[in-house]
Image: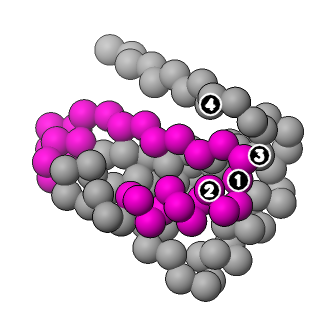
Amino acid sequence: MTVNTFSVYTEPQAIFFRQMRDALREGGIVCTQGESLWLHIDTIKEMMSFCQELFTTVEYANISIPTYPAGQIGFVICSKTSGSIKVYFLHYP
């Protein structure tokens, strides 16, 4: 799994994403900051479109965080493997 925090894509980030894609093993995922559905929908659309050019499977996930602006943050999760990506968020007390 590769995690990064780029949310605006320029050519250096595009090169980095291609390198992450090429480094992924079968079944591996790339997870990037996906911004807030309520505040950045246009950025999310751009991110999803960008990632769909590079990866076979691209999905959006989100979690609630009361202290984050709009109370939510998302993740764009990508894989070279086709099919849905199963992600489990665990909470430990």
The crowd level at tag 3 (other Cα within 10 Å; few <14, some 14-19, many 20+) is: some
Dots 2, 1 in contact, CB < 8 A: yes
Of pointers 1 and 3, the one earlier in the residue sequence: 1
- CA gap, disc 3 and disc 4: 10 Å
Residue behind mark 2: 52
* Residue 87 visible to the viewer: yes
Q: Give the residue at x 74% y 68%.
A: 18
Question: For residue 46, what is the image quadrant?
Answer: bottom left
Residue behind mark 4: 85
Residue 86 appears at what percent x and percent y? Answer: 60, 25
- CA gap, disc 4 and disc 2: 14 Å
Dots 1, 4 in contact, CB < 8 A: no
- CA gap, disc 1 and disc 4: 12 Å
Quick one: SS at disc 4? loop
Of pointers 2 and 3, the one earlier in the residue sequence: 2
Residue behind mark 3: 80
Asked if the magenta segment contains residue 30, the reply would be no
Quick one: SS at disc 1? loop
Residue behind mark 1: 55
Q: Quadrant of the N terminus?
A: top right
The image's mark for residue 8 is none
Hey, what amino acid is under mark 3? Lys
Q: Give the residue at x 85% y 44%.
A: 25
* Residue 2 visible to the viewer: no
